[in-house]
Image (cartoon, rainbow, N blue to C red):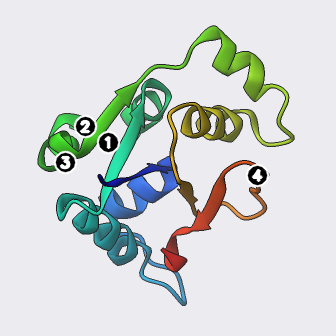
């Protein structure tokens, strides 16, 4: 069975915009993660919160997700998810993502955000994955 991972919104946007920094090709790194997903190494947890955030930046989310649809688990945040997220010492949207990753048995949370840690979930900076 494939490893379940949760990609933060910034990783999806790296792929969509093919972002690069002075030292890293973030778009290529995100693309490699998605290719590994298509090759059955990963299952992606996609939440309603993630989709809501992507809608602000991505014109056609369906086209973005179409090649991956068989490799995605779609989940919704519950009232309990939001309550638990308020307990974390993170920026609130990141807290909700972390809680959803935990609730749906992600083996890791992949992000470009610095300073995100968890005692119960492996947090991976995307260039390391």
- Which residue is at a point 36% across and 71% down the rendered structure image? 27
Residue 20, x across and y down, in percent: 44, 77
> Residue at image x 49%, y 47%?
9
First reached walking from the N terminus: tag 3 or tag 2: 2
* Measured Cα–Cα span from mark 2 to mark 4: 29 Å
In front: label 3 or label 1: 3
- C-beta proximity under 8 Å, tags 2 and 1: yes
Marked residue nearer the N-terminal end (4 or 3): 3
Number of residues whose C-alpha sits closer than 10 Å to that of mark 2, classed few (under 14), some (14–19) or many (20 or more): few
Determine which residue is flagged by label 3: 68
Label number found at residue 58 = 1
What label sits on residue 118 in the rendered view?
Answer: 4
Q: Residues within 10 Å of mark 3 (few under 14, many from 20)?
A: some
| CA separation in Å, label 4 and label 3 | 27 Å
Give the number of callouts. 4
- Residue count near mark 4 (Cα–Cα under 10 Å), binned few <14, some 14–19, many ≥20: few
Front label number (4 vs 3): 4
Q: List x then y, in percent, for residue 1.
A: 29, 52
Please report whichever mark, 2 or 4, sits nearer to the chain's N-terminal start.
Answer: 2
Q: Compared to 68, does 54 lie above or below?
A: above
Using the rendered view, name the quadrant where residue 83 is placed. top right
Q: Are marks 1 and 4 in contact (CB under 8 Å)?
A: no
**What is the secondary structure assignment of the residue under circle 1?**
loop
* Cα gap from disc 3 to disc 1, whole angstroms: 16 Å
| Chain-order first, disc 3 or disc 1 | 1
Instruction: Please state if 57 lies on the left or on the right of 128 as rendered.
Output: left
Q: Could you say whether the residue bearing mark 2 is in a helix, strand or loop?
A: helix
Q: Are marks 2 and 4 in contact (CB under 8 Å)?
A: no
Query: In this figure, which residue is indicated by the disc labeled 2?
Result: 61
User: Of tags 1 and 4, which is closer to the observer?
Assistant: 4
Q: Residue at x 39, y 53 (%)?
A: 12
Q: Secondary structure at mark 3?
A: helix
């Amino acid at each position: 069975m494939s490893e379940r991972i949760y990609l933060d919104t910034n990783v999806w946007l790296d792929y969509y915009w093919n972002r690069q920094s002075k030292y890293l090709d973030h778009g290529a790194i995100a693309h490699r993660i998605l290719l590994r997903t298509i090759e059955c190494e990963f299952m992606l947890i996609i939440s309603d919160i993630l989709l809501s955030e992507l809608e602000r930046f991505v014109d056609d989310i369906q086209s973005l997700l179409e090649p991956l649809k068989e490799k995605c688990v779609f989940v919704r945040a519950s009232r309990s998810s939001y309550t638990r997220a308020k307990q974390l010492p993170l920026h609130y949207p990141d807290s909700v993502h972390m809680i959803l990753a935990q609730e749906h048995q992600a083996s890791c949370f992949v992000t470009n955000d610095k300073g995100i840690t968890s005692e119960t979930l492996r947090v991976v900076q995307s260039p390391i994955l």
